[in-house]
C-alpha cells in the first residue's frame, strides 16, 4: 500500500509533465510554422502549413498530383504544400527549377530512399551533383543514337510477339473476328517489362506470353507505390538501413519481396557479365550489345570513374524501373484515348497504313518520322498521362533561389507537378480535351502557340536531369503504336466502357469520365481500358 502511494503519483507526474512539454512544443511549433517560418507568407491549406503529414497521406492514396492541381486552382501559381515545401505551376518555374544546368538546387532527400534498396544510388537518384554528372557521362553511350539503332530490332521483335499474342484465335491468317478482351494496363505492363529485359539483359522474359515471370513485372509498380509514400515520411532517413531486410519485406508484402528477387536477378546478371564477357562478345559480333554488357566495359572518360558491381546493379534496376513501367503506363493511356476518341483513332490508323505497306517496313527513320499525327497523339498522351505526374522534389541550396520573383530560402523543397502544369489553361487551351491537333501547325494553330505550350511541357523532365532514355522512349512508343494500329482495329470491349476512366465515387478530382485515371506512385498505377482487336488485313 505504502509502495503504491509513493510510485503512482510519480508516474502520473512524469506523464503529465511530458504531455505538458509536448503540448507546449507542438503549440510553439505550430505558431512558428504559421507566423514566423520563412514560408509563412505563402498561401496554402492550414493543415499543409502545420505539418507534412497531409503530403504523406496524399502519396499514400496516390492522389498527390490531383491535390497539386486543386491547390493551384485554389491558391494560384505558388502554394505552400508542406511546412517546408513550395509548389509552383508556371513554365518559368519549371525552367528555373529543373531546366537550368546551374540551378541552385539538388534532388531532395526523397530520392535517397527510393532506390537505396539496391545498395547504391543510380544516375537517377544520385543527389550529389558531381557524382551524378559522372554517372550520366558514363551511361551516355548506352542511349546514343548508335546504341538505339543497334537495339531497335530487339524492340520490334518484342512488339511483334505482343501483336501475335493479341491476334484473335492466334491463327496464321486473320479471321475478321473480334478477339477476346484484354486489359491494356495489364498486358502493356508485361510488354514494357519484356522490352526492357531484352534491351538491358539481352533476356527475353516473355511475360506477355507466359506467366512464370509476371510476378517480377508485377512487383515494380506496387513496390514504387509503397516506396513512394514511405519515402515521403518525415523520418524516412531512419528507414533506409532496413530497406533490404526481412522486416521491410514484411511491411511491404509480396511486391517488395518480388522486387528483391528482381534485384537479385540483376545482381546475378551483373556478376555473370563481370566474370565472363564471352556472351557479350558473341552478341557484339551479332551486331547487338545489351545495355549491361556495354556498361560493364565503360568508364567515365573525364574522371576515369568505373562502376562497382553495386553501381551496375542499381543502374540496371533503375533502367528497368524508369524504362518499363512509365512506357507501359503511357501506352495504356494512348490506347485509352484512342479507343475513346473515334476520330483520333481513325486518323492515326489511316496515317500509319498509308505510310507503310507492311509491318516489316516500320522502322526508325524518315517514314516513321513523317507520321506527324501519330507523333501528335503521343505528345497529347504524354500531356494527359505524364509519366511522373507529381512533384520531383528539389532542395534549394545555400544562397537561395529566385523563382518567379520569389526569393526562396535555402533548404526549402520546391517542385512543379507535370500533371498540374500540363492541365493549365494558360498554356493549353481546353486542357481537359484530348486534342492531338494542338501539336500540329496549321492556320488555326500557329507555331507561336505550339512553342508557348511546349514551354510548359515536360513529360521527361528538362536539362541535365532530363530522362536519359527519352529518345529511346519515343522510339518505343512510336514503334509500338505504329505496329498495333497497322495490324489491328481496336475498340472498347462491349460492356467495359468507362474502365480506367474517372467517374462518381472515385474521389475528389476523379470525376471526368473521359480522363484516364492515374494513381501517383512516382510513376502511376492505372486500370484498363478493356479492349478487343481484330485483324485489319486478312
Ligand atoms: C487491369 O490491370 C491493372 C494493372 O495490372 C489492374 O490493376 C486492374 O485491376 C485490372 N483490371 C481488370 C478489370 O482486370
Image: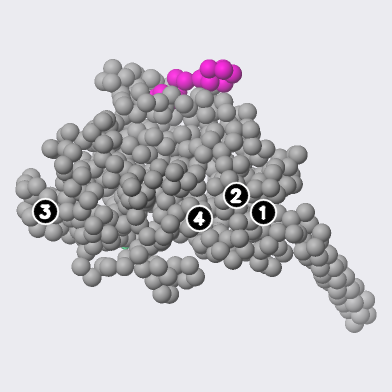
- Residue pictured at 80% horizontal, 63% vertical: 35
Q: Can you identify the residue that label 3 sits on?
A: 169
Describe residue 2's horizontal placement relative to residue 317 as left or right: right
- Residue pictured at 56% horizontal, 59% vertical: 68
- Residue pictured at 41% horizontal, 54% vertical: 384
| Residue occupying the far bottom of the picture | 1
Indicate the secondary structure of the residue bearing disc 3: helix
Q: Can you identify the residue that label 4 sits on?
A: 426
* Labels 3 and 2: the sequence-earlier one: 3
Indicate the secondary structure of the residue bearing disc 1: strand
Q: Residues within 10 Å of mark 4 (few under 14, many from 20)?
A: some
Closer to us: 122 or 255: 122
Instruction: Please identify, in this view, whether the residue under mark 4 or under mark 2 is nearer the observer.
Output: 4
* Labels 4 and 3: the sequence-earlier one: 3
Q: Are marks 2 and 1 in contact (CB under 8 Å)?
A: yes
Instruction: Please identify, in this view, whether the residue under mark 3 or under mark 1 is nearer the observer.
Output: 1
What distance separates the C-alpha of mark 1 from that of mark 4? 24 Å
Q: Can you identify the residue that label 2 sits on?
A: 415
Q: Which residues are magenta?
A: 293-305
Indicate the secondary structure of the residue bearing disc 4: loop
Closer to us: 526 or 263: 526
Q: Are marks 3 and 2 in contact (CB under 8 Å)?
A: no
Amino acid at each position: 500500500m505504502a509502495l503504491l502511494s509513493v510510485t503512482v503519483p510519480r508516474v502520473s507526474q512524469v506523464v503529465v509533465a511530458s504531455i505538458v512539454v509536448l503540448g507546449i512544443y507542438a503549440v510553439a511549433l505550430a505558431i512558428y510554422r504559421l507566423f514566423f517560418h520563412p514560408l509563412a507568407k505563402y498561401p496554402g491549406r492550414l493543415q499543409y502549413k502545420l505539418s507534412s503529414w497531409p503530403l504523406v497521406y496524399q502519396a499514400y492514396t496516390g492522389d498527390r498530383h490531383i491535390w497539386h492541381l486543386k491547390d493551384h486552382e485554389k491558391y494560384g501559381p505558388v502554394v505552400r504544400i508542406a511546412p517546408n515545401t513550395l509548389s509552383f505551376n508556371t513554365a518559368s518555374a519549371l525552367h528555373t527549377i529543373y531546366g537550368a544546368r546551374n540551378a541552385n538546387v539538388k534532388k531532395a532527400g526523397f530520392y535517397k530512399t527510393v532506390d537505396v534498396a539496391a545498395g547504391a544510388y543510380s544516375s537517377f537518384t544520385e543527389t550529389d551533383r558531381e557524382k551524378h554528372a559522372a554517372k550520366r557521362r558514363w551511361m551516355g553511350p548506352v542511349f546514343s543514337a548508335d546504341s538505339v539503332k543497334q537495339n531497335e530490332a530487339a524492340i520490334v521483335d518484342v512488339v511483334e510477339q505482343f501483336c501475335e499474342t493479341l491476334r484473335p484465335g492466334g491463327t496464321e491468317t486473320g479471321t475478321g473476328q473480334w478477339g477476346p478482351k484484354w486489359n491494356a494496363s495489364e498486358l502493356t505492363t508485361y510488354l514494357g517489362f519484356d522490352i526492357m529485359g531484352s534491351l538491358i539483359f539481352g533476356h527475353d522474359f516473355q511475360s506477355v506470353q507466359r506467366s512464370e515471370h509476371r510476378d517480377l513485372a508485377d512487383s515494380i509498380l506496387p513496390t514504387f507505390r509503397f516506396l513512394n509514400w514511405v519515402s515521403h515520411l518525415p523520418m524516412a532517413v531512419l528507414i533506409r538501413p532496413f530497406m533490404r531486410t526481412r522486416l521491410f519485406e514484411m511491411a511491404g508484402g509480396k511486391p517488395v519481396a518480388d522486387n528483391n528477387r528482381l534485384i537479385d536477378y540483376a545482381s546475378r546478371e551483373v556478376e555473370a557479365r563481370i566474370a565472363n564477357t564471352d556472351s557479350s562478345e558473341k552478341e557484339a559480333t551479332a551486331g547487338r550489345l545489351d545495355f549491361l554488357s556495354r556498361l560493364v566495359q565503360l568508364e567515365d572518360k573525364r574522371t576515369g570513374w568505373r562502376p562497382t558491381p553495386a553501381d551496375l546493379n542499381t543502374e540496371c534496376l533503375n533502367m528497368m524501373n524508369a524504362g518499363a513501367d512509365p512506357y507501359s503506363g503511357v501506352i495504356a493511356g494512348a490506347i485509352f484515348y484512342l479507343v475513346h476518341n473515334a476520330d483520333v483513332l481513325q486518323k492515326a490508323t489511316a496515317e500509319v497504313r498509308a505510310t507503310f505497306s507492311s509491318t516489316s517496313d516500320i522502322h526508325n527513320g524518315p517514314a516513321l518520322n513523317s507520321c506527324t499525327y501519330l507523333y501528335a497523339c503521343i505528345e497529347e498522351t504524354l500531356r494527359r498521362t505524364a509519366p511522373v505526374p507529381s512533384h520531383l522534389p528539389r532542395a534549394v541550396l545555400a544562397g537561395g533561389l529566385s523563382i518567379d520573383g520569389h526569393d526562396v530560402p535555402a533548404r526549402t523543397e520546391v517542385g512543379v507537378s507535370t500533371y498540374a502544369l500540363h492541365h493549365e489553361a494558360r498554356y493549353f487551351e481546353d486542357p481537359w480535351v484530348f486534342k492531338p491537333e494542338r501539336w500540329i501547325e496549321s492556320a488555326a494553330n500557329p507555331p507561336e502557340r505550339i512553342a508557348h505550350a511546349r514551354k510548359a511541357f515536360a513529360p521527361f523532365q528538362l536539362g541535365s536531369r532530363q530522362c536519359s532514355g527519352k529518345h529511346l522512349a519515343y522510339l518505343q512508343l512510336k514503334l509500338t503504336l505504329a505496329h498495333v494500329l497497322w495490324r489491328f482495329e481496336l475498340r472498347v470491349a462491349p460492356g467495359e466502357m468507362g474502365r480506367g476512366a474517372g467517374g462518381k465515387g472515385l474521389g475528389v478530382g476523379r470525376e471526368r469520365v473521359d480522363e484516364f485515371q492515374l494513381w501517383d506512385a512516382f510513376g502511376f498505377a492505372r486500370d484498363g481500358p478493356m479492349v478487343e482487336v481484330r485483324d485489319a488485313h486478312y
